[in-house]
Image (cartoon, rainbow, N blue to C red):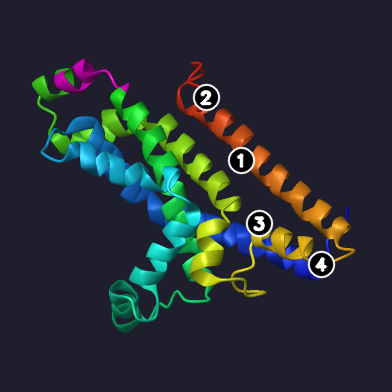
């Protein structure tokens, strides 16, 4: 299977968008996972529902909301443009933002399960021996939650690779800028005689997602010291 230069560009763009999306979302997702796993506060149920909302609303709705907030005339879009010089409309940065939002629920869920599975007695024992909260977090809580972090990263990556609805609604289909693998497959399906291109891009999508899942399982097992902590 030989890809054309344009198809290699689509693969490279998809990888860049997905990697940036999960990289940016990692601290946010972990913070939400920790908040939901360890804290009790008024409105926790609502926060939990809002975090997982992209899983259940139509992706086009998520894209429309991103358009309202981060579009050229959106309040957050103007803020990012003026403060950081980052624009989202018809840019790969917008595709990364849409992918990050869609990947967040899966990342939070995997990390939260891992945090909830930590034996609190280990943390309490360390505190009774004089370790501060920061040291307990860095030496006990964070390492023990690592399989969940890895799982969240890879699930977010796989979700980002397959993201379509919110992305095309938010940043449209711009060749070389926002045309990721799913959008390229959709565009090719609209053209007669492009079945071979669709097949090649679909195979690449499957291989990337499958490779990510296999790698995540291997990394999670290694991080857990060989225990059977499956990430899926």
User: Regarding mark 2 in the picture, which secondary structure is present there?
Assistant: helix
Name the residue beneath numbered marker 2: 221
Mark 3 → mark 2, Cα distance in angstroms:
30 Å
Residue 136 visible: no
Mark 2 → mark 4, Cα distance in angstroms:
44 Å
* Callout in the foreground (2, 4): 4
Q: Is residue 118 magenta?
A: yes
* Callout in the foreground (1, 3): 3
Name the residue beneath numbered marker 4: 191
Which of the 4 image quarters holds residue 181?
Answer: bottom right
Boundaries of the magenta span:
117-124
Residue 185 visible: yes
Mark 4 → mark 3, Cα distance in angstroms:
15 Å
Closer to the camera in the image, 197 or 45: 45
Q: Do the residues under discs 1 and 4 have CB atoms within 8 angstroms?
A: no
Name the residue beneath numbered marker 3: 182
Neighbours of disc 3 within 10 Å: few (<14), some (14-19), many (20+):
many
Q: N-terminal of the two: label 4 or label 3?
A: 3
Establish if 216 lies above or below 83. Answer: above
Which of the 4 image quarters holds residue 131?
Answer: top left
User: Regarding mark 3 in the picture, which secondary structure is present there?
Assistant: helix
Q: N-terminal of the two: label 1 or label 3?
A: 3
Q: Position of residue 163 (x, y in %)?
A: 56, 53
* Callout in the foreground (1, 4): 4
């Amino acid at each position: 299977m030989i890809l054309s230069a344009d198809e290699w560009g689509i693969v490279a763009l998809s990888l860049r968008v997905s990697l940036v999306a999960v990289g940016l979302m990692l601290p946010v997702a972990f913070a939400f996972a920790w908040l939901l796993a360890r804290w009790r506060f008024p409105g926790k149920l609502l926060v939990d529902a809002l975090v997982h909302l992209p899983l259940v609303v139509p992706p086009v709705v998520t894209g429309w909301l991103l358009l309202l907030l981060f579009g050229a005339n959106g309040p957050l879009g103007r803020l990012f443009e003026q403060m950081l010089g980052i624009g989202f409309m018809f840019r790969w940065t917008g595709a990364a933002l849409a992918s990050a939002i869609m990947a967040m629920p899966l990342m939070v869920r995997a990390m939260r399960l891992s945090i909830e599975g930590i034996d609190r007695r280990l943390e309490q024992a360390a505190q009774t021996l004089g370790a501060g909260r920061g040291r307990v977090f860095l030496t006990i809580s964070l390492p023990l939650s690592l399989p969940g972090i890895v799982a969240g990263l890879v699930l977010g990556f796989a979700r980002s690779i397959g993201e379509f609805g919110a992305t095309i609604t938010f940043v449209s289909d711009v060749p070389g800028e926002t045309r990721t693998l799913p959008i390229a497959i959709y565009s090719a399906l609209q053209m007669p005689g492009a079945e071979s291109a669709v097949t090649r891009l679909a195979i690449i999508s499957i291989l990337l997602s499958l490779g990510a899942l296999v790698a995540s399982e291997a990394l999670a097992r290694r991080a857990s010291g060989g225990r059977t902590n499956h990430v899926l």
